[in-house]
Each structure stands twice: as C-alpha cells, then as structure tokens.
Image: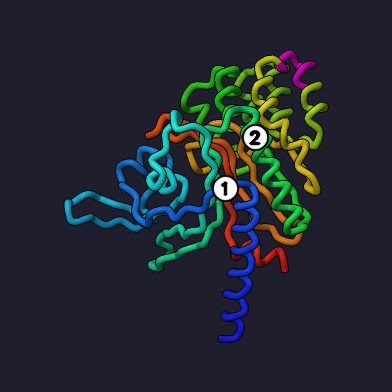
Amino acid sequence: MATWLQQQSRQTELFKTLLSMAEGLDYTLIEPPYFIDYDDFRNDQPLNDPKDWIKLSNPEGRLLVLRPDLTTSVMDQLQWKPSDGPLKVSYYASTFYQDKERLEAKKEFGFEFFNAPRPEGERHLVSTLNQFNQTFNLALICEVSHAQVLPLIVSLAGFNSEQSATFKTLLKTKAFDQLKPWLLNQNLSTSLESLIETLTEPNSSLLTLKNKLNGLGYLDRFESILKSVEPFESFQSATVVFDFSGMSTWSYYSGVMFQIYALNSPKVLIKGGRYVVKRMNGEAIGFSLTLDDLMEVSG
C-alpha cells in the first residue's frame, strides 16, 4: 500500500508539473469524452484492427467505443474547425483496450495545436519539446520521420499494390537485411536504389542528407519534407536522428512524425507529429506521453 501511495503521489506531482508547463505555454486543459462514435472512429482509423476496442451501444442503438486513442476524442470534445483559428489544448486522460481478457488503461498527457501552419507549427512543437526537456532534464534521443516519404518513394519507383505492401512491411518490421535483395529484384535504377538506401538509414545531419539527395538528383522532390523536419535541428539537449523508415500504426499522420526515447529506457517516452482531422477538414500537430513512462525515467 505504501508503495502504491508513493506512486500515486509521484504521478500527481508530475501531472502538476506538466500542467504548469502547459499553462505557461498557453495550452488550455480539457477533459475528452470517454466514448467515441464507432463509425466515426473507424473512418478516422481505417488501418487499425478494432478487435481490441471496447464496444457498446447507447440507448438509441448507436455503436460506441471506449476511447482507444485520444486524438479523435479530443476532436469530439472541441468540435473545432479550421475557420475557428489556431487553438492550443492539453489533456490528461486514459485510453482503453482489451488485452488477454483484461481491460487495460493508460494515463496520457498530451499537447495539441490545431490549425498550426507549416512550418510555424513544427517550430512551436519543438519549442514545447525544448520546454519539456528543460523542465525534466532528461537525456533524450529523438527519431524523426515523415508520413509522405513512403508514398513518394512508391510513386517514384512505380510500385504496384503488391510491391507497395511488401515494401511497407519490410520497413515496418525493420527487415533491412531483406530489403536490399528485394530491391535488387525490382529492376530499379541505381540512383533510385541509392535514394531508398539513403532515406531508410539514420542520418544525424540534415545538411549531409540534403547533399546526398542533391547528388542523386532528388533534392527538389523532397524539399518540402526536409523543410517540415528542419525545426527539429533546434531540439536542444536531445540527440536528433532523421530516419525516414519510421512508420506509425495510426493512419491520420500527414507530415512530420517522431518518437523520443530516454537513454535509460528502451520504451518510447513521447510520440507525436502532424495529422489530419478528417471530419473537421483540418490539421493539427502535437505529442503525448504516459505518466507511468515519465515516472520511470525521471526518477
């Protein structure tokens, strides 16, 4: 009991610290609804398997889901639309899923900036991450990717649907030992093979990456993507790696994506990026973390 009370006290302390940080950056705290319309959520997340979602019907017979993700439920709470202008909100809430006959829940704290223009939104995001790291003083590694790299490679290579699926699977599973021989069998040009190799290996210097792309003759095709990730070069006290093999299971990402690790833990501490809000015809950028993970790495 004493250990549990100490954990709860520590979590409360971390929550208050995050809340103070969010308020200082003009984020408004909201409480997202517990239940999301099932059909709306399926439309937002067509690539995710609903078998682990907790489903039930409301009195009118409408199928609902106990929120497995907070982004959509934040949208439901706000009913925000682009014409409303920029909006910064934070939230502290649980997500739920079924795991081996048990209902699992995890508490998340998140920062969302709606109607965030490019690249100003990305710069503000990195500024918020810098403030986070100044607050908690952690040794971090940030892996940065972009949602448009994969479809652009597929387009340049002229992959059909079967090739695209295989390519995506090889990247998703990090099967790089299989990727090179598979590419050799696709009859690609040498420059295109080199492009894929360049984009799917970690790069710590964006300038070096730009020079490589320029030498291969593809810099102009990736210019807007590089501009989107460029603000991460100013992420202080963190080792930043640009790795465009990185992917996400959430289908709403539309631009920069990233995940951040603490050096003393193999688990992802922070994840986020830019995403589309389909039902409101808008875009936002943000990130989230769980208090359990933060408690583990911050001592």
Residue 104 placement (x, y as % from top left) = 45, 65
- Residue 198 to residue 237: above or below: above
- Residue 112 to residue 210: above or below: below
Return the residue nearer the eye: 178 or 113.
Answer: 113
Return the residue nearer the eye: 118 or 4.
Answer: 118
Q: Can you see residue 287? A: yes
The residue identified by callout 2 is 122
Describe residue 70's horizontal placement relative to residue 156 as left or right: left
The total of numbered circles placed on residues is: 2
Describe residue 187's horizontal placement relative to residue 277 as left or right: right
Is 215 included in the stretch rendered in magenta? yes
Q: Quadrant of residue 57?
A: bottom left
Residue 27 is labelled as 1
Which segment did they paint magenta? 212-219
Q: Can you see residue 169? A: no
Disc 1 residue type?
Answer: Tyr
Residue at 60% across / 46% down in the picture? 26
**In which quadrant is the N terminus drawn?**
bottom right
Q: Quadrant of residue 3?
A: bottom right
**In which quadrant is the C terminus drawn?**
bottom right
- Residue 213 to residue 263: above or below: above
Disc 2 residue type?
Answer: Glu
Between tags 2 and 1, which lies in front? 1
Characterize the magenta stretch by its predominant secondary structure. Answer: helix
Residue 174 placement (x, y as % from top left) = 64, 42
Which comes sooner in the sequence, label 2 or label 1?
Answer: 1
Residue 112 placement (x, y as % from top left) = 54, 44
Residue at 29% across / 52% down in the picture? 64
Residue 156 placement (x, y as % from top left) = 60, 17
Return the residue nearer the eye: 264 or 134.
Answer: 134
Could you tell me which secondary element the residue under label 2 belongs to? helix
